[in-house]
Image (cartoon, rainbow, N blue to C red):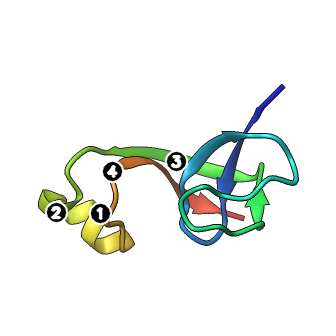
């Protein structure tokens, strides 16, 4: 069963199995230890997306450990 993990590199919230790669950036560095949750629908119009360096719509964690 998939677990909700977060990519340490791009902060995208993912429903993937442990040991899988992030489909967004290809990183293998996934974490279960994260806090905060933001959904970015229109990154080109979002100040939060700009501050986080997000260019693609999706679900993101604010802090990843």
**Residue at mark 4:** 57
Q: Earlier in the sequence, mark 1 or mark 4?
A: 1
- Mark 1–mark 2 CB contact (< 8 Å): yes
- Around disc 4, counting alpha carbons within 10 Å, would you say few (fewer than 14), some (14 to 19), or many (20 or more)? some
Taking depth in this image into account, of 35 and 2 the one nearest to the observer is 2
Q: Quadrant of residue 30?
A: bottom right
- Quarter of the image with the N terminus is top right
Answer above or below: position of 64 versus 50.
Answer: above
Give the secondary structure at mark 1.
helix
Taking depth in this image into account, of 10 and 22 the one nearest to the observer is 22
- Around disc 1, counting alpha carbons within 10 Å, would you say few (fewer than 14), some (14 to 19), or many (20 or more)? many
Q: Position of residue 15 (x, y in %)?
A: 67, 37
- Mark 2–mark 3 CB contact (< 8 Å): no
Query: What's the distance in space between the residues labelled 1 and 3, CA to CA?
Result: 14 Å
**Residue at mark 2:** 44
Q: Earlier in the sequence, mark 1 or mark 2?
A: 2
Query: What's the distance in space between the residues labelled 3 and 4, CA to CA?
Result: 17 Å
Taking depth in this image into account, of 35 and 11 the one nearest to the observer is 11
Between marks 1 and 4 in the image, the one whose residue lies nearer the viewer: 4
- Around disc 3, counting alpha carbons within 10 Å, would you say few (fewer than 14), some (14 to 19), or many (20 or more)? few
- Mark 2–mark 4 CB contact (< 8 Å): no
Left or right, 20 with reference to 60: right
**Residue at mark 1:** 49
**Residue at mark 3:** 36
Q: Earlier in the sequence, mark 3 or mark 4?
A: 3
Between marks 3 and 4 in the image, the one whose residue lies nearer the viewer: 4
Residue drawn at 48 percent across, 44 percent down: 37
Between marks 1 and 3 in the image, the one whose residue lies nearer the viewer: 1
Residue drawn at 60 percent across, 50 percent down: 35
Q: Quadrant of residue 28?
A: bottom right
């Amino acid at each position: 069963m998939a677990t909700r993990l977060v990519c340490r590199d791009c902060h995208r919230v993912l429903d993937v199995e442990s040991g899988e790669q992030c489909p967004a950036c290809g990183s293998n560095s996934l974490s279960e230890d994260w806090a905060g949750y933001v959904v970015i629908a229109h990154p080109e119009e979002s100040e939060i997306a700009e501050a986080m360096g997000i260019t693609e719509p999706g679900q993101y964690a604010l802090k990843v450990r």
